[in-house]
Image (spheres, rainbow, N blue to C red):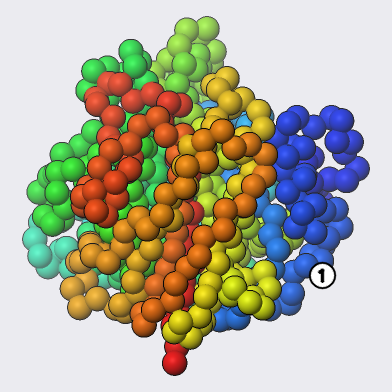
Amino acid sequence: MPEQQLPVWADPAVSPATLDAQGVSRRHLMRRAGLFGAAFALGGAAAPAAAATGRGHGGEDPRLAYLVGDHHVHSVYSHDAKYTFSQQARAAARYGLDWMVFNEHANFGHASFGAALEHEEILKARAENPRQLIFQGLEWYIPAAEHCTVFAAPGPHEADLLTKFELAYDGKLLGYTEGAAGAADTARNEAHAVKAITWLAEQRRTGYVDDVLVLANHPLRLGIDSPHEMRAWRDAAPEIMIGMEGAPGAQGAALPGWRGATSIRGEYENKPSAQSWAGYPADAYLTYGGFDWATATVGGLWDSMLAEGRLFSITTNSDNHRTVFDTWKNGDWPAGQNFDTTGRLPDPVNTDTPQPGSDFWPGQFSRTHVGVTRYGYRAVMTGLREGRVWLDHGHLLDGLEVRLRREHGGGRGVTLGGRLRVRKGEKLTLEITVTSASRPNPRGILPQLAHVDVIRGAVRGAVSDRDAWRAPDTRVVRTTDVSGRTGTYTLRVPVTVGDESFYVRLRGSDGNRNGTGYLGASVDPHAPVPHEPGNGDPWADTWFYSNPVFVDVVG
């Protein structure tokens, strides 16, 4: 693989005079973390050795720089997309992405032809874009359920791993789909999904690949990812199956006047079917402020999993197939060819006329920020696995740094995804450092954060009902109005420690749209709300979310 270069904002050889406002802002944040230049390229004193192998219960996490990425991007190697690798990589660079995953749909044409051809283009794309981290991935049709992102660290077996996995475990190729004929088929299919994740863990354990990760995509779009399935995937290999999309792609699906009067943001335009899990209410099939119901509902499914005391991360992404207002269309097939015989669509052609689409380019609207101690592929995967993740829409923030520490002698404390072991009655402080948006976003709006919400939930351990989707003790415990605040500022929130272990997580928005949360005002008085069909301008309703920090109360 060619030598990797630092992103321009992280490269000391690049003059600050050539950076845009956000690049200057990111460089400033990096300097504050002590990771600029060689310290970032090679790993520095700011990153203790323990950080590379796992995290314990101590009160000191390393300082982090945040890399921005997207784990769900499609190309001509997906049967329903249209862009080349070069088009996607150029767009990702234009919108400030540091890492991306080409996550192509599984099918026979892809497995037989496309995956190998795609790998050749992955290698070419890495050489052409040395300042980007470009992963090869697969959009897995989970047996009996929805889709997942599966991606591996670069190495000699990355493409072979994905192809072997696709042929042996993909629900679409095997016919192990959500439309199973009866209970026996459903049980077989669900068990096969668990075997798939276990197999991936074994490939990592034996060193066949350096690393591999799985994330559930648009989990409530069809309602076929039941709570017990999601818990089973997580429990099979929590180091591999690390989380889910907190917000889907297709965020431009309900731009007013674009796709039609019935369009829903995120293309969550479905109703419960015979294959859907019966315990989900009809409201679960909508997005709330662009976020999946499982994530957006305080005290809902995501919180019910966190309340077990186990990390389950969230992300956001473009799921880019067809960009809104784009003028490109799919090219024509040569005579006698199709996707099944080639594994690849013809290159697109420009029409100069806007074409149908629901998506934004990678990084244009949705961004997943991953905290790392050095630059590189495995560093991104480690940051994702350890839960050092926050997300924003519409470029709402330039930066977010979260630390939970003891009030006295707590050092830097622990950050997102981390754990702090304390005794009952100890005094803690949650420090939330926000860096406001420094430039207009791609829509031409200078985003302004209006509020920061602290959400707290009790940790009660493993649930007896594997289909539980409520966390009755989780609620918004504090809302801070930050309207008009700019630059970098820190909110300091006192945190009380009682008898029970707990977690805290963060959320905030531009304040343009909110209402009573799904489980009531006493749980969430200023929640994201669904857009009415056909009128879901995402740029006017932007939110950020963070992963949790856990507090284990002992003694």
At a point 21% along the width and 50% down the height, the residue shown is 520
Q: Residue 252 appears in which quarter of the rendering?
A: top left
Q: Residue 337 appears in which quarter of the rendering?
A: top left
Where residue 132 appears, as percent x and y from the top left, is 70, 44
Where residue 453 appears, as percent x and y from the top left, is 43, 50
Would residue 486 be visible to someone looking at this image?
yes
Other-residue count near label 1 (Cα within 10 Å), few / some / many at <14 / 14–19 / ≥20: few
Compared with 508, 443 (above or below) is above
Q: Quadrant of the C terminus?
A: bottom left
Residue with the most extreme bottom position: 555
Compared with 335, 394 (above or below) is below
Closer-to-camera residue (75/40) = 40
Question: Which amino acid type is marked by label 1?
Answer: Ala
Q: Secondary structure at mark 1?
A: loop
The answer to whether 236 appears left or right of 334 in the picture is left
Closer-to-camera residue (111/366) = 366
At a point 48% along the width and 85% down the height, the residue shown is 423
Closer-to-camera residue (52/232) = 52
Where residue 213 appears, as percent x and y from the top left, is 50, 62
Where residue 7 appears, as percent x and y from the top left, is 76, 43
The answer to whether 179 appears left or right of 99 in the picture is left
Compared with 184, 463 (above or below) is below
At a point 8% along the width and 61% down the height, the residue shown is 182
Q: Residue 288 appears in which quarter of the rendering?
A: top left
Would residue 222 be visible to someone looking at this image?
no
The answer to whether 234 appears left or right of 99 in the picture is left
At a point 80% along the width and 32% down the height, the residue shown is 19
Residue with the most extreme top position: 352
- Total of numbered circles in the picture? 1
- Look at mark 1 in the image and give the residue it sits on: 45
Closer-to-camera residue (264/204) = 264
